[in-house]
Image (cartoon, rainbow, N blue to C red):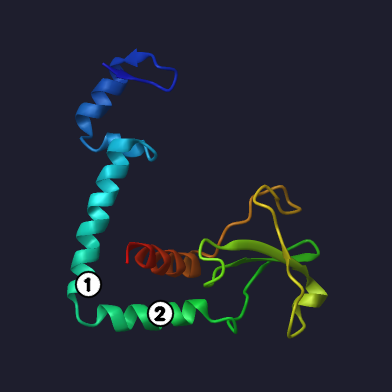
């Protein structure tokens, strides 16, 4: 029988595991699922690198993503503009904020936020999906090189 979060074995969990052979992937930090991810990354990277246009495209995209002259798009929340920023110096990204008036200048003074900082609304800020997806993809590819 399968076990639930409290360690109790249940028939419902066992039935779900039989119905979904990939249920084990939901254990995102588990050794089995992480090994599967590593194997898929090796397979995907080999396919990508077999394309002769991969490296020039990769280098061009990384150059754009690491450019310091990008427009720092942000989310307004009360009197601040919050921005998730990734570049060569911050490959995993940082959350930062500046006040609205300063954001309107050509060189805003950004305050880097600690990981646990929340916005004034009490919700965790979220990265813009488009830029985050591209940046994470380029960073992941760089990590595999």
Q: At 20% from the left edge and 65% from the top edge, which residue is drawn?
A: 46
Q: Are marks 2 and 1 in contact (CB under 8 Å)?
A: no
Q: Return the x and y of residue 117 as percentages of the image width and height.
A: 70, 50
Quarter of the image for residue 42 reads: bottom left
How far is mark 2 from mark 1, CA to CA? 15 Å
Q: Is residue 69 above or below residue 80?
A: below
Describe residue 140's horizontal placement relative to residue 39 as left or right.
right
In the rendered image, the quadrant that contains the C terminus is: bottom left
Q: Is residue 2 above or below residue 83?
A: above
**Residue placed most toward the observer, 29 or 80:** 29
Q: Which residue occupies 76% across, 53% down?
A: 120
Q: Considering only vertical position in the picture, is 136 above or below 2?
A: below
Q: Residue at x 48, y 77 (%)?
A: 65
Residue 61's tag is: 2
The disc, 2 or 1, on the residue closer to the chain's N-terminal end is: 1
Residue placed most toward the observer, 49 or 132: 49
Badge number at residue 49: 1
SS for callout 1: helix
Label 1 CA crowd tier, 10 Å (few <14, some 14–19, many 20+)? few
């Amino acid at each position: 029988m399968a076990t639930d979060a409290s360690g109790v074995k249940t028939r419902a969990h066992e039935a779900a595991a039989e119905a979904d052979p990939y249920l084990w992937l939901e254990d995102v930090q588990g050794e089995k699922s992480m090994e599967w991810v590593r194997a898929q990354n090796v397979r995907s990277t080999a396919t990508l690198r077999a394309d002769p246009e991969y490296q020039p495209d990769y280098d061009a995209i990384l150059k754009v993503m690491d450019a310091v002259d990008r427009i720092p798009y942000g989310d307004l929340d009360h009197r601040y503009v919050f921005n998730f920023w990734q570049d060569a110096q911050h490959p995993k990204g940082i959350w930062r904020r500046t006040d609205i008036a300063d954001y309107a200048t050509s060189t805003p003074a950004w305050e880097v936020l600690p990981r646990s900082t929340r916005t004034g609304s009490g919700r965790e800020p979220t990265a813009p999906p488009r830029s985050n997806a591209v940046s994470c993809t380029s960073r992941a590819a760089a990590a595999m090189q």
